[in-house]
Structures are given as C-alpha cells and as structure tokens.
C-alpha cells in the first residue's frame, strides 16, 4: 500500500505552519513545510484566506489522491465540530463562533471527514513523545507563546491539560507565562514597548533590564511547574512554543527555583520545536485509520 500523506498544520496566535507527513514512515517531508506570520486581530476573511494560502502552498507539487488535514489550534475551540470559541484572549476575536471546518471544505476542495482538529499543546506533546517515548513516565508539555498551552501524558494517555486559566499569583497562569507578560514587564521597567519577545531576547546581553525580565519569567515558570509536579507527580516537563527559543535566558532561574525538590524531574526543551505540533496533529487521528488500513 502506498504510504499516505497527511498535512499537519500548526496554527498559533501569530503564525501558521504547514507540512506534509508521510504516515507510513512517520516523517515530516521538510521540503513541503510552509510558514506565514498572521495578524490575529485582522478580519475573519483575511485570516482564513491566509491560512488557506499556506495550506495550498504546502500541497503544491504533491500529487495526493485525497487531501487529509490535521490541524493544531489553541483553545477554547470545539475540536470535534471545528468551531472557534476564542473570544477574550486578545486573538482571533473575528473568528468567534465561526465553523472553520466548513470554511476549509468550501475553499480547499477537501472532504468534511478529512479535516481533524486537535488542541495545539496536545498535538505538541503527542509529536514530541513520538520522538521520545516516555514509557511509564508522567509528562507535562507546555507551549509558551502569545498564550500558555498545556497537555499531560498520564499512564500513556495524552490529553489537553487546559491550564491557561489556572489561578496563579494575582491572576491566572497565562497572564504571567505568555509573551505579553514579558513585553509589559519590560515596558514597566524601562518605558520602552518592544514589538515582541524576539526583540527583547536580542537585548539580553547588553541590557540589564531585559535580563531581569527573563529572570523573573523563569521564577514565575518554576512556581507554576512546581505546583503541577506536586499535583501530578511528574517525571518530565517538555517546553515548547516561541518563547522556548529564549530558554537560555530564563533557564538559570527556572532550575534554581526547582532545586528544593527531593525527586528528580527532567526539564527539557522540545527538540522538534514547531514540527512537534505538525507531527502530532497529523498522526493523532489519521494514524489510527492507517492501522486499520482505511486511508
């Protein structure tokens, strides 16, 4: 049987990445990967058109018998029916209550049942653990970007942990562990508002205030992880998302604030990076069909 291709798509708060997955070999076809930055405050038509453009570019040049697409998106989202429920998270407000699956069916010439949605953090952890099987370990996966994503692997089962709105410090976890906190905190200390975390990261070696902000972020992240270790008896924590690229800037504070623990808990950065979500989104549902030879 010919190895089927499934398109894995990772939609974040400010970007979309798409790439074809060879399910038989469970490998990402690197030459098919396409990326585009997205303004999450645009009108619905602009956002959907940009998503469809990247998906079509990823398929370009590949002769597939039938398009199959697995998409990883942030919540809240009705993953079974494909309806966006994001309303008050400073992104995708224009997509609220829109049926994204129907839009893709109409615009991309793909069958309804060949479009699957999964939580982005869950897809990230599924993809990462495929590359590094955890055995019997309990694993927390967190994605740090414009918001906070989270997933748990307990007794071999991966599920969305939905920790973004967990009570934390003087608010909820996402308010302290997303990119917005880093930018706002730097502005509080300096009066300068940077466009993003990438620009803040570039200042660390020459700007003491930038270094301080990442240190405080690492301290906050340690407190959050510590609470989850206590709750789930974790063996491992895997960190992904755009902010993980700046891990060296906050890892010292993170690890220092976890040294009090008697048990050893592995804290590591994703090796697959953004590709983990592509792999997890494409394989979660369609791989089950492959095993039943339904593709």
Image: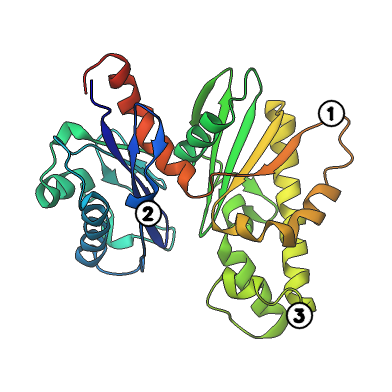
Residue 17 position within the rendered picture, expressed as x and y whole percent measured from the top left: 37, 54
Point 48% across, 35% down: residue:
127
Query: Closer to the camera, 214 or 89?
Result: 214
Foreground label between 2 and 1? 2
Q: Is the C terminus in the top left, top right, bottom left or bottom right quadrant?
A: top left
Position of residue 198 relative to residue 289, above or below, is below
**Residue 223 tag number:** none
Point 58% across, 69% down: residue:
197
Point 30% across, 27% down: residue:
286
**Badge 1 element:** loop
Question: In this rendering, does residue 86 appear at all?
Answer: no
Query: Closer to the camera, 124 or 169?
Result: 124
Q: Which of marks 2 and 1 is nearer the N terminus?
A: 2
Q: Which of marks 3 and 1 is nearer the N terminus?
A: 3
**Badge 2 element:** strand
Query: In the rendered image, which quarter is residue 34 located in?
Result: bottom left
C-alpha separation, residue under disc 2 versus residue under disc 1? 37 Å
Position of residue 140 relative to residue 214, above or below, is above
Query: In the rendered image, which quarter is residue 236 located in?
Result: top right
Residue 244 position within the rendered picture, expressed as x and y whole percent measured from the top left: 62, 54
Query: Closer to the camera, 291 or 76?
Result: 291
Tag 3–tag 1 contact (CB < 8 Å): no
Tag 3–tag 2 contact (CB < 8 Å): no
Question: Extreme top residue here?
Answer: 292
Residue 228 position within the rendered picture, expressed as x and y whole percent measured from the top left: 69, 36
**Residue 207 tag number:** 3
Mark 1 lies on residue: 263
Query: Closer to the camera, 30 or 200?
Result: 30
C-alpha separation, residue under disc 3 versus residue under disc 2? 32 Å
Mark 2 lies on residue: 17
């Amino acid at each position: 049987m010919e190895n089927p291709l499934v398109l894995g798509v990772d939609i974040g708060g400010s970007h979309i990445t798409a790439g074809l997955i060879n399910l038989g070999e469970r490998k990402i076809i690197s030459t098919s990967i396409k990326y585009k930055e997205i303004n999450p405050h645009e009108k619905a038509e602009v956002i959907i058109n940009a998503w469809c453009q990247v998906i079509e570019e990823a398929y370009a040049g590949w002769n597939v018998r039938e398009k199959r697409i697995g998409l990883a998106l942030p919540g809240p989202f009705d993953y079974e029916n494909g309806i966006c429920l994001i309303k008050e998270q400073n992104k995708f407000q224009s997509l609220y209550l829109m049926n994204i699956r129907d839009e893709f069916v109409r615009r991309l010439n793909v069958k309804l049942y060949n479009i699957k949605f999964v939580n982005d953090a869950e897809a990230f952890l599924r993809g990462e653990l495929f590359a590094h099987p955890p055995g019997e370990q309990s694993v927390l996966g967190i994605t740090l970007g414009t918001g906070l994503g989270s997933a748990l692997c307990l007794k071999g089962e991966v599920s969305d942990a939905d920790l973004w709105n967990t009570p934390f410090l003087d608010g909820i976890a996402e308010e302290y562990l997303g990119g917005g906190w880093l930018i706002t905190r730097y502005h509080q200390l300096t009066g300068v508002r940077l466009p993003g975390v990438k620009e803040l990261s570039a200042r660390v070696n020459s700007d003491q205030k930038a270094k301080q902000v990442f240190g405080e972020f690492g301290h906050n992240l340690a407190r959050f992880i510590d609470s989850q270790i206590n709750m789930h008896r974790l063996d491992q924590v895997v960190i992904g998302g755009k902010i993980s690229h700046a891990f060296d800037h906050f890892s010292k504070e993170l690890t220092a604030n976890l040294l009090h623990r008697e048990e050893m808990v592995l804290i590591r950065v994703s090796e697959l990076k953004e590709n983990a979500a592509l792999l997890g989104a494409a394989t979660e549902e369609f791989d089950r069909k492959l095993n039943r030879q339904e593709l």
